[in-house]
Amino acid sequence: MTTTAEAIALVNAAVTPQNLFGGDAPHRTYRRLARCLHPDLTTAPGAPEAFARLSALWAALHRDPAGEHAEPETVITTPGGTYRIGGTLHRGATAALRACEQDMLLKLPLSPADNDLMRREAASLRTLEREGDPLLLPYVPRLVESFRHRADGVERRVNVISRAPDGFLTLEEVRRRRPVLDPRDAAWIWRRLLVAVGTAHRAGVVHGAVFGQHVLVHPVEHGLVLVDWSQSVPVGSPLTALVTRRRADYPPDVLARGPATEALDIRLATRCVAALMGVRPDGLAPSGPGAPAGRVPGPMRAFLRGSLLAPPRDAWRLLAELDELLDDLYGPRTYRPLHL
């Protein structure tokens, strides 16, 4: 059962109506949240504002935000099943994510030239499901089906993948809402991100694009999902695709088509966490608006710096060292909701 505090956090974390109502029972989700937030039922601080935002998001769900006709629903039948495809939820540089029933997403490349990215993602997700620890697989999407689809004379490779539950948002959105996190809030994200990449590495896969737009977190339940595996490769293989706008974040050896190892994912994951804490990529000092000097303890800045300049290849060992550091700095771990 959702508490009022959790409902407030979920509504405030939602960027689009689909973030809240993207499941297969949007009316049930609305009623559940409304019962927690309605001014007649609670006097909790922040509830009236959250209820107003909930109402606005619910209204927006039933109209086309661009003032145009919504995309027509499409039905695609494959050997694996029949999918009712709704509107576009997100359009990236190479692919679009379309709504799909039963908590799934349909990922469609914008150009047939990017079919290989969909094949690579499908291969990696299959490997993770086959070789990964079943208890840790919720950290990555599940591949439901991958198939070829021809429309308008063009054939594209389509992936159907599991959809993160309601309430998840990207680290980019977290930074937009809270430019600087308390290190204790960033710590649980760091730990779970190391678990996600560590799970992939044990299965022999390098993600290759651990950037904020590909990391989804749940601010209340502290869940994390590492998405978009289209740049992934087997450990030790060179990357065949880069996120162009993040080219400067890749190390020189990877740009020179050297082998992509576990250290690449750990380096990029550490950069994500450093950015959340307002720390420059060199890990030495705060940066950006609202980043007070000394907010990040010296030992943690040193740990960040070491993980950036000489990233290890063992995410699990780094996680153990991080846990020791957190115990020394903050004592036993306690639950901290991430207020955005």
Image: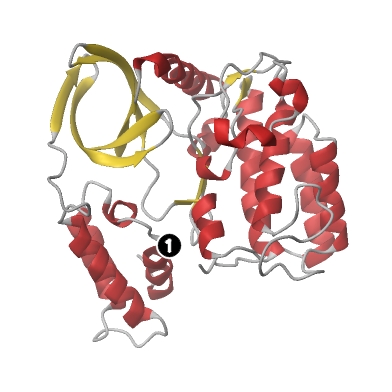
Q: Where in the figure is residue 173, as x and y percent of width and height?
A: 49, 55
Residue 36 seen in the figure: no
Question: Badge 1, how many Cα within 10 Å: few under 14, some, many 20+?
Answer: many
Up the image or down, 180 lies above or below 171; here it is: below
What is the basis of the colouring in this image?
secondary structure
Q: Where in the figure is residue 139, as x and y percent of width and height?
A: 52, 39
From the image, which quarter does the N terminus lie in? bottom left
Q: Using residue 239 as the reference point, say whether residue 64 is left or right of it.
A: left
Residue at position x 42%, y 28% in the image: 94
Q: Nearer the viewer, residue 161 or 230?
A: 230
Q: Using residue 122 as the reference point, say whether residue 209 is left or right of it.
A: right
Residue at position x 31%, y 57% in the image: 20
Residue 20 seen in the figure: yes
In which quadrant of the rendered view does residue 11 lie?
bottom left
Q: Using residue 201 as the reference point, say whether residue 332 is left or right of it.
A: right
Q: Where in the figure is residue 156, as x and y percent of width and height?
A: 30, 16
Up the image or down, 40 lies above or below 52; here it is: below
Query: Mark 1 highlights which residue?
Result: 13
Q: Nearer the viewer, residue 46 or 199?
A: 46
Residue at position x 21%, y 66% in the image: 31
In which quadrant of the rendered view does residue 62 lie?
bottom left
Up the image or down, 83 lies above or below 290; here it is: above
In which quadrant of the rendered view does residue 295 lie?
bottom right
Q: Amino acid at mark 1?
A: Ala
Up the image or down, 296 lies above or below 242; here it is: below
As helix, strand or loop, the secondary structure at mark 1 comes to helix
Q: Where in the figure is residue 334, as x and y percent of width and height?
A: 65, 66
